[in-house]
Image: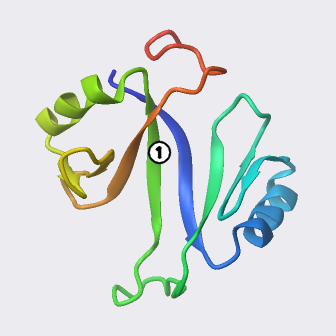
Amino acid sequence: MIGRLHHLVIDCPDPYALAGFYAALLGQPVTYCSPGFVVVAGNSHSSGLAFQLAPGHVPPRWPDPAHPQQMHLDVMVDDVAAARPRVLALGASQLGGPGSTVFADPAGHPFCLVPRPGWAAPIGTD
């Protein structure tokens, strides 16, 4: 195990409004809010859905490949620098330059390596 799912991050034009929709739909609170980024989760010490501001957002039209889905995974790791070569060895490719924490899976879907928050148990202990 290299990491653990932290959030599914969804691009949108209004993160707070979309988070409010999913908070009501799922019966979960908004646990984090900053300009352009809002999280809905069971509590402030758990993973959940994140909503990220995407200026110029064009909504997906399923199943229209001309308007694809716009989401990525955040994968929490104990040490981003140590995880980088391990995900590359699995077949990921690094996006955005040498210091970037953004990768693509073998099919091209983006994901980010994020440092494990202090509230989360160390990776491999659950």
Residue at left offset 25%, top offset 58%: 96
Q: Residue at x 78, y 38 (%)?
A: 42
Viewer-closest of 4 and 13: 13
Is 106 located above or below residue 89 in the figure?
below
Numbered label tally: 1
Direction from residue 99 to residue 24 in the image, left or right: right
Q: Position of residue 93 (x, y in %)?
A: 17, 50
Report the residue at 60% width, 74% height from top: 12
Amino acid found under the numbered disc labelled 1: Asp
Q: Position of residue 8 (x, y in %)?
A: 54, 51
Colour pattern of the rendering:
rainbow
Report whether 71 appears left or right of 41: left
Q: Quadrant of residue 6?
A: top right
Residue 60 position in % (x across, y down): 50, 83
Which residue occupies the foreground of this view, 71 or 26? Answer: 71
Give neighbour class at mark 1: few <14, some 14-19, many 20+ (Cα, 10 Å): many
What secondary structure is marked by label 1? Answer: strand
- Which picture quadrant has residue 2? top left
Does residue 48 sit above or below 50 in this rendering? above
Considering the image in quadrants, where does the N terminus appear? top left
Q: Is residue 120 above or below residue 35?
A: above
Find disc 1 in the rendering and name its residue.
74
Residue 114, given in percent of the width and then of the height, sits at 45, 37
Which residue is depicted at the point 18% across and 47% down?
98
> Image check: 39 left or right of 17?
left
